[in-house]
Amino acid sequence: MMQTGQMHLTDKQSVELIRSTNQNIAIISQIIQKGIDSGEFSPLSNVWQMQNAIWGMLNGVISLYLFTGNPVKRMERIHSTVQGSLNVFINGLKA
């Protein structure tokens, strides 16, 4: 997303990438709202801000390992770091 100009996407592909990204972000918001509605998460005054924080964290973790570290262990490290980071976030939402 940060370097789409270097990806040489067609206009159609760019539109689809943006649409898909927005759908994924909306799903994060829906999950947060369901957790609030069910009482599993503490009420938030700004679900939009929290969804963006989670999205940013996920992108940051993925970007970190895309550009650093051992390529053989890359997927494993991304998965374990994302899982650990989400656990921290979820525990915070429950508090």
Image (tube, rainbow, N blue to C red):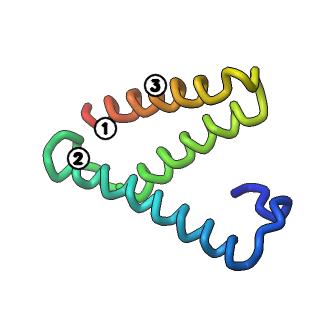
Instruction: Identify the element where label 2 is drawn.
Output: helix
- The one nearer the camera, 36 or 76, is 76
Kind of residue at disc 3: Gly
Alpha-carbon span between mark 1 and mark 3: 14 Å
Which mark sits nearer the N-terminus, 1 or 3? 3
Q: Is residue 35 above or below residue 78?
A: below
Q: Horizontal placement of 57 versus 4: left or right? A: left
Give the labeled residue for mark 2: 35
Q: Position of residue 48 (x, y in %)?
A: 41, 59
Instruction: Identify the element where label 1 is drawn.
Output: helix
Which mark sits nearer the N-terminus, 3 or 2? 2
Give the labeled residue for mark 3: 84
Alpha-carbon span between mark 3 and mark 2: 19 Å
Residue that extends furthest to the front in the rendered view of this protein: 72
Instruction: Locate the N terminus and report the quarter of the image it occupies.
Output: bottom right
Q: Is residue 42 above or below residue 86?
A: below
- The one nearer the camera, 62 or 16, is 16
Q: Horizontal placement of 43 versus 81: left or right? A: left
Alpha-carbon span between mark 2 and mark 1: 9 Å
Residue 41 position by quadrant:
top left
Residue drawn at 75 percent across, 21 percent down: 70
Kind of residue at disc 2: Gly
Q: Position of residue 31 (x, y in %)?
A: 31, 51
Q: Position of residue 65 (x, y in %)?
A: 69, 31
Are discs 2 and 1 less than 8 Å apart at CB? yes
Kind of residue at disc 1: Leu
Are discs 1 and 3 less than 8 Å apart at CB? no
Give the labeled residue for mark 1: 93
Residue drawn at 46 percent across, 58 percent down: 25
